[in-house]
Image (cartoon, helix red, strand yellow):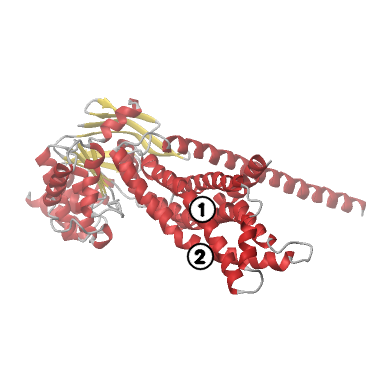
Amino acid sequence: MIEVKNLTKSFDGKTILHDVSATFYTGKTNLIIGQSGSGKTVLMKSIVGLVRPEQGEILYDGRDYLKMNAEQVKAIRKEIGMLFQGSALFDSETVLGNVMFPLVMFSDMSHEEQLERANFCLSRVNLTGAENKYPSEISGGMQKRVAIARAIALNPRYLFCDEPNSGLDPKTSIVIDELLSDITHEYNITTIINTHDMNSVLGIGENIIFIEKGHRAWVGDKNRIFKTSNEALNDFVFATRLFQEVKDYIVNHGE
Amino acid sequence: MTNYCDKYIVLKSIVIVTFVVDFQLQNNMLLINSISQFGRYCLFMRRVFTIPDRWRVFLQRTLQEVSKLGVDSIPLVVIVSLFIGAVITIQMQLNISSPLIPAYSVGLATRDIVLLEFSNSILCLILAGKVGSNIASEIGTMRVTEQIDALDIMGVNSSNFLVLPKVVAFVLFMPVLVLLCMGTAFLGGLAVAWATDLISVTKYVYGLQAFFQEWYVWYALIKSLVFAYIIATVASFFGYYVKGGALEVGKASTNAVVSSSILILLFDVILTKLLLQ
């Protein structure tokens, strides 16, 4: 479980996060949603340590991240896997090289064991056969899956995903969502997904945190979101006519 | 009329004062920016020069960088040195031909120019363009595509992991490039002597050997090591701190080449003063 307490972050005098508190549960897909520029990426980057907040606490199963020394930070980062918006695969490495990278750097496995683990992770994301290709030779969806395989290679306790569906077609987005959800439940990890894809919200949102103008404006799950009276959230989630009709149908007829 | 003149003088004074203040402020800003950049560079270096997480990975990456930054520069070094060596020989012959100066002086002057300046300073200025832009654009692209963030998240010291192998590889391989440059430049001069009637091959070769000072070779090698360090670290620094997209990567690459070239020239003066006097 990751707890965030009273997080505040500013850039050049402009406050991006205002006293944000949230809890992200283990074994659940936790979603941070909000409009572009609402502060959700800053929140995620603060949690993983890419941005240092001015105030607040970030507790990884009770361990305060902001009070850790360099060695402790290094240790906890080995428990973190992250999927970046643009996949962030290493261009100079093959698919297999990318997945093996964290194993080579941080595990004490033999080369054969590393190879076995990397192949297992690739098969877990249904990517067998692409081991020797370079990131530039595979599609965006495949790149995301390689990034997921790399993120889970070291059996992380915490998985962060920044806009995992951006740039993907709806069908591939669903595949990625289901994969993230399955991995979360299978390995009982704390997964935090930063998204503004409404299919993801309604599909895998077990714990949803809505950020509006740097404030935590709403917390709930995919079922509660249909009945919310929060105007900003309604405007954001049910912005399209299709989603509005789906909401009306569910509210009127039940699930 | 007097009143009008007074107002004109006051107005003109205000304009001049404003201009001077603005100029001063700009200079101060430039100074502050330079000091701030130097501070960031020092902090960056502190992170670069730490013990690698995995020695095996570090050695592997260093060998890759030797191939990429060093071995791949050999064709450029050979071509440039061959032609410049030939040009220096021709120019020496044309400029110092006199009944009072012995013919072998052409070889001697060519040798000293190549040893003292061309094989280190000029070569490094050329390599600052090739290697510096290569390093800055590679690391800059990794920054804007979040690959460096990915390394940091994994707990890898990204500056050490990416930059140290480049610095070590380039500094270690630089003497090879310098010696190759010297040899090829002399061959370029020899080709001129052989193919033209400007100077005989025997006199040219005699000139190359006459009054030879071994220290000049060491001087060239010492300078080249410092320049190699400047090229690799300055380019890495500019690449590592890129913010934005492809346009900024291009700008960082240009800034890296310009800054390392200026630093090479500056250190050329300092090292010449220190090593030759």
Mark in the foreground, 2 or 1: 1
Reading the image, the residue beneath label 2 is B79
Secondary structure at numbered mark 2: helix
**Which subunit holds the residue at mark 2?**
B
Task: Answer with mark 2 or mark 1, whichever residue precedes in sequence.
Answer: 2
Q: Residue at x 89, y 50 (%)?
A: B3
Judged from this view, the residue extending furthest toward the right is B2
Callout 2 and callout 1 share a chain? yes
- Name the amino acid, label 2: Ile
| Residue at screen point 58% across, 42% down | B33
Q: Which mark is residue B179?
A: 1
- Does the rendering let one see residue A37? no
| x, y percent for residue B154 | 28, 40
> Disc 1 marks which amino acid?
Leu
Cα separation, mark 2 vs mark 1, equals: 14 Å
Q: Chain of mark 1?
A: B
Residue name at image x 32 percent, y 26 percent: A68
Side of A196 where A252 appears, left or right: left
Depth check: A84 or B224 in front? B224
**Which one is in front, B186 or B58?**
B186
Crowdedness near tag 1: few (<14), some (14–19) or many (≥20) residues, C-alpha within 10 Å: some
Crowd class of label 2 (few under 14; some 14 to 19; many from 20; radius 10 Å)? some
Q: Position of residue B40 (x, y in %)?
A: 50, 38
Q: Position of residue B143 (x, y in %)?
A: 38, 49
